[in-house]
Amino acid sequence: MTKEETKSVLMEIVAQIIPDEDLTNLKGDIPIREQVELDSMDFLDIIMELRKRYGIEVPEDDYIQLATIDSSVAYLEPRMRDL
Amino acid sequence: MNRDWLKDTKSEYDVIVIGSGLAGLTCANMLAKGGHSILLLEHHYNLGGLATWFKRKGGHIFDISLHGFPVGMIKTCRKYWNPEIADSIVQLKGIRLDNPQFSLTTTYDSDDFKRVMQEHFKIPRETIDNFVSALRGMNFYDDQTMTTRELFENFFPGRHDIVRMIMEPITYANGSTLDDPAITYGIVFSNFLNKGVYTFQGGTDKIIGMMRAELIKNGVDVRTKCLVGKIGIEDKKIAGVVANGKMIKGKAVVSNGNLLSTIHKLVGDENFSESFIEEAKKVRLNNSSCQVYMGIKKGEKIDYIGDLLFTSEAEKFDSEELRSKNTTSRTFSIYYPQTRPGSDMYSIVASSNANYNDWANLSEEKYRASKEELIQRTLDALEKYVPKIRDKVDYLEAATPKTFQRYTLHLSGASFGTKFEGLKISMGLPKEILGLFHTGSVGIIMSGWLGAANYGVIVANDVDKFLS
Ligand SMILES: Cc1cc2nc3c(=O)[nH]c(=O)nc-3n(C[C@H](O)[C@H](O)[C@H](O)COP(=O)(O)OP(=O)(O)OC[C@H]3O[C@@H](n4cnc5c(N)ncnc54)[C@H](O)[C@@H]3O)c2cc1C
């Protein structure tokens, strides 16, 4: 998967989990939780979805790396490159 | 009549869930949706655990724990159950607090709370905003050394009236006191403050019925009247459970029973490391409850006096007074006919916090007399809000910590699981025994309908990881 594809997959998952939020103006370098309503259960849903769809395990210590869209893509890209 | 409640069970399941509280139910549902074979075992004849109800002659139905939950329950039901369940959740708008310090009505959502704090308690808007955002920013992994008392003292020094306003409802909701960590308060209070207090229209029987149907649709093998006596362990790994005397194999076991009885009774201390047992022994249980159920005669009406009334004659908030046997502090939940659309019945449930030990060791005669006293004192207090209440009721019953223990098997009838330290122990079980998990009210933040259901999801995720 390319970096672009990784990002679009991530955005699709986020959109599925918080369908009521408008994601069009989401900034990549600001924590997602500061821009839209995304609680800790929503965050866990993102982690679960990544595992279910792509078999990616994100250990709890790495959660912090998924704070913004940009940092998430940077974190996921090497793990999704071969998918 | 000895019916076999475990007739035709399979010889092995991926996961056996013990207990059908909201955490057990939600965990079972998520795992079944993930494609695992699930056996759900409940000792009572109804599912739901503390999310329960009972019927009495005269057409009365009483709900036990439907006083109210945070708006987050809508999302939780939509995501982990189905949209139909989520769609029946509605706001309760009339929250009343009445005590010697103040008397007011609020919806208890963020805007109205700020209004009350400004208009009634004369707190500057900035202080309120700072307080609310401090609570919003709290996470369970933050510093736990600050107590709730210290938090309040920082924002509202010396203001006992405000402490009562912001604490008393939470103490009823989860048994926490001013000595519990500020973060547990912050997380729970923010959840409520977000959009106020919500309920399930149709009653507890309806939501649990809908959940049961969903579980069956997703392939869960649901069994009631099945008491698990033992969790089987071989070589530090889960083997299965013994239910109604029958051994059933499972790759993983999730206990939704009381955390401490899961460890000490169902598994047994000998199966854990010494250091783990030492830590587990330090876990404190939360308090228990008393309730008085009042059925209003068919044809009688009650004028609207609010949905949830927090009442007390105590001079100020004191969690020990709240739990004491002669407390004057209680909440009244008024269930108008709208609770169950189509019905024309009213009922009132009074709840108070209680200590197990005040009730556990009474003689049969003393116990009965104490229950009667509780009922009479409750009616006296209710008279202020519903005049001539004694003429309107035709059914009265009381529950005590012993009742809660009998129906849910919680040690000491614990109503809200454990204090904060229980969370770490609950989450630590899989590291001690491969395939053993616990879900259910622990750590204050994982209790209540919302906390328990969400914890069920968190644990389902861990179990799914373990199985794959
Ligand atoms: C009086 C009262 C009022 C409340 N009001 C509210 C409220 O208004 N709003 C709110 O959000 N929360 C309320 N709560 C709290 C809320 O009800 C609980 O936190 C929540 O329902 C607990 O869910 P749970 O999953 O932890 O399990 P529980 O409800 O405790 O259920 C555990 C289940 O496991 C079963 N079980 C245990 N051991 C075994 C065994 N060995 N074999 C088989 N089955 C077993 C029990 O029978 C029970 O069904 C109230 C609680 C009480 C007591």
Image (spheres, coloured by chain):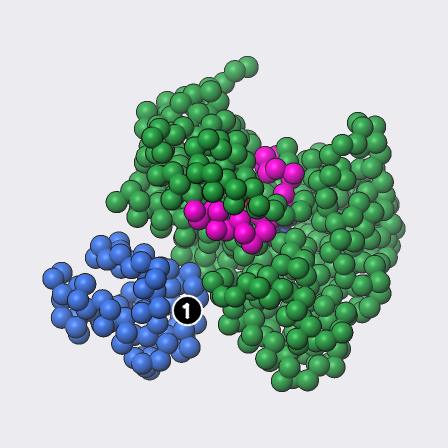
Chain colours: A blue, B green
Q: Give the residues drawn in magenta, as a range.
A: B407-428
Left or right: residue B455 compared with residue B91: left
Give the labeled residue for mark 1: A38
Of B231 and B48, nearer the camera is: B231
Quarter holding the N terminus of chain B is top right
Looking at this view, is B437 or B296 the one in front? Answer: B437
- Work out whether A73 lies above or below B210: below
Q: Chain of mark 1?
A: A
Please indicate whether residue B224 sits to the left or right of residue B118 in the image: left
Q: Residue at x 72, y 68 (%)?
A: B163
Q: Is mark 1 within 8 Å of ligand 1?
A: no
The answer to whether residue B440 is magenta is no
Can you tell which quarter of the image residue B260 is in?
top right
Q: Quadrant of residue B205?
A: top right
Residue B424 in view of the camera: yes
* Amino acid at the residue labelled 1: Leu
Locate residue B345, reporting x and y percent: 70, 47
- In the image, residue B367 sits, relative to residue A32, either above or below, namely above
From where the camera sits, is residue B211 visible? no
| Label 1 crowd (10 A; few <14 / some 14-19 / many >=20) | some
Q: Residue at x 38, y 38 (%)?
A: B433
Q: Residue furthest top?
A: B1
Residue B255: % across, % down = 46, 38
Q: B270 or B240, which is in the foreground? A: B270
Q: Residue at x 41, y 52 (%)?
A: B458
How many callouts does the rendering have?
1
Q: Is residue B107 left or right of residue B80?
A: right
Q: Image check: A35 left or right of B185?
A: left
